[in-house]
Image: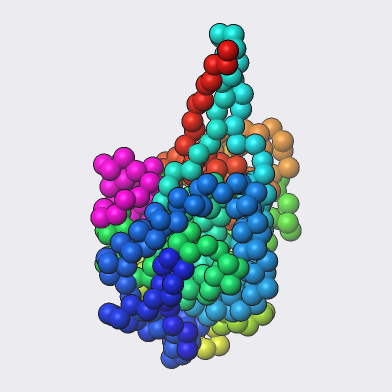
Amino acid sequence: MVHSRNWVGGEWITPASDELAVKNPSNIHEEIGVLHLSDASHIVQAEQAARAAYRSWSRLTGAARSEYLYRMAAALESASADVARLASMEMGKPITEMQGEVIRGVNLLRYYAAEGVRSNGVVIPASEPNVLQHTKKVPLGVVGVITPWNFPVAIPLWKIAPALICGNTVVWKPAENASLTATLLCEVFAAAALPPGVLNLVVGKGSRIGDALLEQISLDAVSFTGSTATGTRIAQICAKRNIKYQTEMGGKNAAVILNDADLEKTVPMIVSGAYRSAGQKCTATSRIIIESGIYDAFVEAMKKAIDGIKLAPSLDPSAYLGPVASASQYETVRSYVKLAREQAEIVAEGRSAEANEEGYYIPPIAAAGVDPGHPLIQEEIFGPVTVMMKAADFDEAIALCNQSLYGLSASLFTRDLAYAHRFLDEAQAGMVRVNQETAGVEYQSPFGGLKLSSSHSREQGQAALDFYTELKTCAIRYW
């Protein structure tokens, strides 16, 4: 049995108030751990610890901070099997996917560790003689990091690693059903001798400690990934307090398949983008737009592919997808499946898990036959449900692709370079791809969307360094 703990100022604290049992979504009768939930006082303690640690951490050289991140990466790599297993049991992602996610976390730490010895400013010519004018990036201070459950390792680390290398300290509030994994990660980083107070973990319900994090303590920035409703509220609070913020929110991502697409190569990417992680990725393929000339062939190929998907417990190495993450997620996704059965045509549906009644299993499903304004087309489902639409030509396909409140990721499948370049220009999404699935982006590349998908900043890559710093313009006259 695993128990969550807070890590504040380098000390382990077990809150003495409410507890919450954690059930394995692959087998709801199996209790894998207990969450010990915090109150506002723990957030205050974490901010105080982070503020105290900031004085010394921000004054370290970039090279010195690099060494800490390299040690964190090595420690995570050594513990990767344990971290992947716990995370897979906690939120249901298949173990093979989770192992890859942990390695991504290791790579993120190493990528940002290397930034400690790279340039962080430029020299600007001055109009007067004997003046040296330059810029430099300086840390913000204490950063609040609020992370979701769907990527319990990668998303926290693509926020925390750049925050730390830039000289900030962190107060981290993970989602409840990723908090056992968060505790283990902090245990790993404590073993790597990360200085006390540089990273602080507070476990609890957002409804109980979220307001304390956002409104009661002194923060210099907030980085959030989660729902659009919560993200917009966070943006309002931060704007009112003049706190720098970034919010990564929803997606309703489209894959466009043109008549000349190679179906043998395209269909596996569509299936992966739509159904890996049980569709619980903000970049998952949710809308499939097919040019009319290839529509029937594509549907037949998808039927065959979906029929071959194995739905199984998350620790089964042969599982293509596992359960959805929680009871609430199960009920939400099932409501959309019910809507599809009532108001759409079910084009394809996968097989149920052998132990379907024991976990939050939802077979992959593809629907069709609804208009572009239908909730199945417009609302984020966050489950293994996709909807197909037919387009007469490329122009109609682009129009359907862009007919969304969201604009995170979009893909085009074609052999025509002219259409490929038009798509990269015309698709209204922050990440556009040709002959690649919508889901995911490499860790060294900027991550973020347009419209209601993002607050218009970017995570990952060099862009993350811009968010976690202020740009200071410096000038000195020498006689």
Is residue 33 found left or right of 128 in the rendered image? left
Residue 40 sits above or below residue 251 on the image: below
Of residues 211 and 26, the one drawn nearer to the viewer in this rendering: 211
Q: Which residues are magenta?
A: 215-244
Residue 312 sits above or below residue 161 on the image: below
Residue at image position (68%, 61%) is: 268
Residue at image position (35%, 50%) is: 219
Tell me which corner region of the image, top left, top right, bottom left or bottom right, holds residue 260.
Answer: top right
Extreme-front residue of the structure: 479
Extreme-top residue of the structure: 128
Image spot of residue 116 (x, y percent)? 63, 47
Q: How many marks?
A: 0
Is residue 452 found left or right of 287 in the rendered image? left
- In the rendered image, is residue 163 in sight? no
Residue at image position (45%, 52%) is: 54
Image spot of residue 271 (x, y percent)? 62, 63
Tell me which corner region of the image, top left, top right, bottom left or bottom right, holds residue 77.
Answer: bottom right
Of residues 347 and 101, the one drawn nearer to the viewer in this rendering: 101
- In the rendered image, is residue 183 in sight? yes
Please identify the quadrant where the C terminus is shown.
top right
Image spot of residue 135 (x, y percent)? 55, 28
Of residues 200 and 145, the one drawn nearer to the viewer in this rendering: 200
Is residue 149 found left or right of 126 in the rendered image? left
Residue 193 sits above or below residue 465 on the image: below
Residue at image position (33%, 64%) is: 45
